[in-house]
């Protein structure tokens, strides 16, 4: 079982991995997220964490935000392309697929994610 501090470390490493997949330097990603390369390096070094708005923009750029946050890759075969899902909806989809929930609870979770995304 991992500890919170281990998970925090992994988030930074996964963010760096996704940034490199996008072919961006820390400075270039910082500019796209309206911040600085120094801030991106702080995220990657786990000195601080990215804001929700930055994660949303990363998702729009094609990064797998679910992977950054949880360590699990985005499920294959979603009904809609990833670009149409918000981070809250992707997380809800992940939970619904990987946690034993009743059909009613899964639908409630998805509805809550859609509300949070507005």
Image (tube, helix red, strand yellow):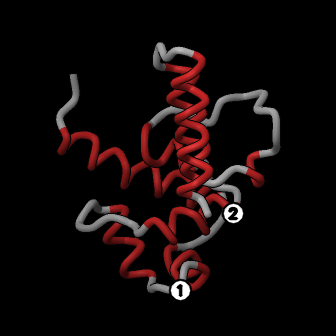
Furthest toward the right, the residue is 80
Task: Characterize the local packing of mark 2: few (<14), some (14-19) or many (20 or more) Cα atoms within 10 angstroms.
Answer: some
Residue 88 is left or right of residue 60, and the answer is left
Viewer-nearest residue: 18 or 109? 109
Viewer-nearest residue: 43 or 116? 116
Circle 2 — which element?
Answer: helix
The image quadrant where one finds the C terminus is bottom right
Task: Characterize the local packing of mark 1: few (<14), some (14-19) or many (20 or more) Cα atoms within 10 angstroms.
Answer: few
The image quadrant where one finds the N terminus is top left
Q: Position of residue 41 (x, y in %)?
A: 37, 71
Number of marks in the rendered image: 2
Q: Position of residue 50 (x, y in %)?
A: 39, 67
- Up/down of 111 relative to 98, above or below: below
Mark seen at residue 60? 2
- What residue lies at 61% left-to-right and 80% top-to-bottom? 32
- What residue lies at 45% left-to-right and 81% top-to-bottom? 37
- What residue lies at 74% left-to-right and 47% top-to-bottom? 82
Q: Position of residue 81 (x, y in %)?
A: 81, 44
Viewer-nearest residue: 5 or 16? 5
Q: Which residue is mark 1?
A: 34
- Up/down of 36 relative to 12, above or below: below
- Up/down of 88 relative to 51, above or below: above
Circle 1 — which element?
Answer: loop
Viewer-nearest residue: 102 or 81? 102
Residue 84 is left or right of residue 19, and the answer is right
Q: CA distance from mark 2 to mark 1?
A: 14 Å
Q: Position of residue 35 (x, y in %)?
A: 47, 85
């Amino acid at each position: 079982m991992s500890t919170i501090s281990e998970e925090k470390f992994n988030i930074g490493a996964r963010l760096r991995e996704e940034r490199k997949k996008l072919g961006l330097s820390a400075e270039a990603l910082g500019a796209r997220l309206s911040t600085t390369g120094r801030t991106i390096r702080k995220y990657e070094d786990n000195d601080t964490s990215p804001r929700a708005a930055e994660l949303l923009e990363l998702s729009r750029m094609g990064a797998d935000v679910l992977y950054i946050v949880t360590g699990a890759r985005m499920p294959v075969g979603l009904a809609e392309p990833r670009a149409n899902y918000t981070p809250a909806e992707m997380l809800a989809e992940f939970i619904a697929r990987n946690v034993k929930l009743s059909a009613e609870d899964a639908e409630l979770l998805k509805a809550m994610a859609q509300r949070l995304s507005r």
